[in-house]
Image (spheres, grey):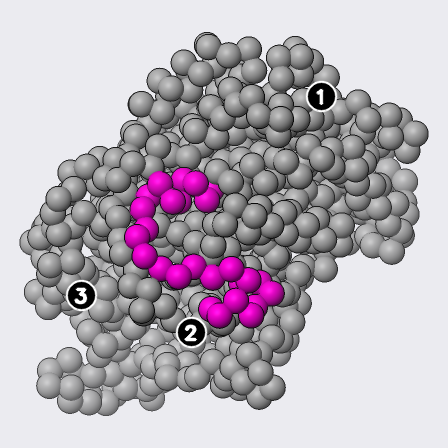
Amino acid sequence: MGADYKLADYDQMLTYYAKLDAASDRVQMTEIGKSVHGRPMKLLAISSEKNLKQLARFREISGKLARARIPEEEARKLAKEGKAIVWFDGGMHATERAPAQMTAELAYRVATEESAEMQKIRDQVITLIVPVINPDGVDIVVPWYRKYLGTPFETTSPPILYQEYVGHDNNRDWFMSNMPETKAVNQVLYQEWYPQIVHNHHQTSPAWARIFLPPFRSPVNPNIHPGVTSAVNLVGSAMSNRFAMLRMPGAISTTNFSMWWNGGMRTAPYFHNMIGILTETAHATPTPRYYDPAKKPATVAGLRTDGSEVFYPFPWEGGESHFRDAIDYTLEASLAVLNLAADRRETMLFDFYRMGRDAITNTKQAFAYIIPKDQWDASEARNLTEILQRGGLEAHEATAPFQANGKTYPAGSVLFYGAQAFRPYLIDLMEKQNHPNQVAYPGGPPVPPYDLAGWTLPMQMGVQVDRIDSAFAASTRELKDLIAIAPGQLSGKGKAGFVFSCQENAAYQVVNELLRGGFPVEILQDTLLNAGGKPMAPGAFWVAAQNGLETRLENLAAETGISFTGLDQRPGSQVKPLRKVKVGLYKSWMANMDEGWTRWVLEQHRFDFDTLHDIDIRSKDLTLYSAIILPSQSPNGILHGHAPGTMPDEFTGGIEIEGAARLAEYVRNGGTLITFDAASDLAIELLGLPVRNVTEGLSNQQFFIPGSLVRAKVNPKHPLGFGMQAEVAAFYDDSRAFEVFKHSYSGEGGEEKIARAPEPIADVVVEYGSKDLLMSGWANGADRYLRSKAALVQTPYGKGKVVLFGFRPQFRGQPRGTYKLIFNSIFQGGK
């Protein structure tokens, strides 16, 4: 493994894993799930022959210690009996090529090597290896490298996401569990094996270093047990010492990565009292490279390269760099982890238990979090419960009404009691984040967080969750399995047809299924005063009676949980028909995760859509589409893409001026253009819209909101706001805020054209809050630059409409509370 110019593909790897499993009594291979493309995900358990015969017992011990429901005396006995459980994975980010290649050799060495160190490891440790956590990525990246080997594009990466929907964000899905790969791994981590150490291999290190390893930089999330933080540092020190004693230079620490954010493969385990380890190794391609020692920089990632730094004590001097170097560094980092786990086995197991007990017995934090049965969007309340369950949290369902904190809750409400071992995970996802105001130096610019600053799930998902601090009594049953969808109901005879609310995201799945099945759907424009004895708000959907409708609705009610109310009379003039909906989703050859997430959301909600590449924008009949979506991407990226000569010709360029003109023509002739975040800049400039991004040009010392949730107000009477709560959390990450003018531009020569009407010609559907803007995360300058500014604008252009999102309403599949803004924008084009 690691030979110059060579990569093993996934079929070769699978063949090898099977041979290793068949040849050794020290290896047990199982399949834990399937990738998006249906490829098997393998888990190798490696230990001594004796240990493998008792594998179920050691897994049981690990689970009991993790859950910490047993007395201390029993825990001490189990810590003596048990084995340390250590997890390794490779291949998550497929263009970081070495880890997926290394894991086969790691498995071979742990299974076969007869050194004293390895015998000790096999005796004391159960080594779990998922050799390739993203098989589809290997299937994409390896053929690309082989195809372009020996060409100018040898070291380029494929122009598509290396995971079908999310690409690099497959390491950002670890609390949402949106992807099948994430679901499979979380099941093993938090329901089956409960490893004490989780080592997530990545590339690359800072330039001129050989490997990044812990300790991480500040800040650390205060919900993480300090025993985890100190243990992470201990593991990092063991790796650093191993490299030093092997005379392997270039190990660096405390740069870039922190311990604040939840949601990564190595960070989510922190909140489960597990030791999450990230390493980033240099040289991600099989193509060799030479680093001229004379050009060695004076600093690497801010640390001096003269050997005087505590966290970069043995600098690399440069010279030849080969793919095999990356294999060697990742192997030795893994062996350092295994050696430490073997030496500290009993202590590590008992500490695992003690951290869980600390969480259970903590009386200073919430007694419980309650998800009431009655919700604005019951489908997302159920989804929140499932997300928390997939992360290993213990959920209970009320079997009878009960009272807590003076409020009565009905049966069917879901409770997450605080007294559980993974309380840090529960708190971190339920409560707001308050990121410290870190600056580079007094008076200096902010130090951006690693990934996000705030992510509170009830806020993002629009789900009511009540924190209860005082003890209360309730009759409950533990939800041993994932919470099921409660079937919806059909009420009334429905002689004329059926009406159903648009408050739930799942309602849009129903609409798209009905349209696909040939059942016309209409949208209520006003409140329907009597829908089965209660009013139905604007935006509700009406479907007229016809043969086969009731059977279809019964099936959809069972599948989605949506209920339907039958009416004996048609609602009348207050409904408008929803014509055929067909979405065009722009997809650049600059692989764009925002496009992938948008595609995933559209698929999940069963929209009919096509992918539109650059050539399609320039040449296809765009009138086929009721709406076209431009996911968040820079205007330059959309217009010009990869520069000529940097990629094979067929993947260079963007929509170019020709495509931009055709988009303008599409809207002018009646189409709907929807733009997310950065793509809104292109629409504003291209079409001369009466809108300005007020945050453009501000320095991060003036205005800074990195990956946070901000308060936004919605106009629920506007068609784009139908079904929305009046206040939502908007995901904001270096995003946009709009000012709407009372004039427009002709679009010809930049000449200004004053609107005749005294009112703004654009509709402000969502605006950022007027007070308490920051809901979760970190914000500087929000009151000055964001307060009451427009966040979602719809403006006419010719016969069509442009919908400008200043934020990303579908970011990573998390902000479910703003999904309907997308769906309603699409449906506007279908009218």
Ranked by sequence position, the earlier of labels 2 and 3 is: 2
Q: CA distance from mark 2 to mark 1?
A: 49 Å
Please give the residue where the numbered disc 2 appears in the rendered image: 298
Disc 1 crowd, CA 10 A, few/some/many (<14, 14-19, 20+): many
Q: Could you tell me which secondary element the residue under label 2 belongs to?
A: loop
The residue at 28%/43% (across/down) is 286
Asked if 365 appears above or below 113 in the picture, the reply is below
Disc 2 crowd, CA 10 A, few/some/many (<14, 14-19, 20+): few
The residue at 35%/59% (across/down) is 318
The amino acid at mark 2 is Ala
Ranked by sequence position, the earlier of labels 1 and 3 is: 1
Please give the residue where the numbered disc 3 appears in the rendered image: 639
Disc 3 crowd, CA 10 A, few/some/many (<14, 14-19, 20+): some
Q: Could you tell me which secondary element the residue under label 3 belongs to?
A: helix
The residue at 68%/50% (across/down) is 234
Residue range corresponding to the magenta coloring: 305-330
Asked if 456 appears above or below 767 in the picture, the reply is above
Query: Looking at the image, which is closer to me, 341 or 572?
Result: 341
Residue 292 lies within the magenta run: no
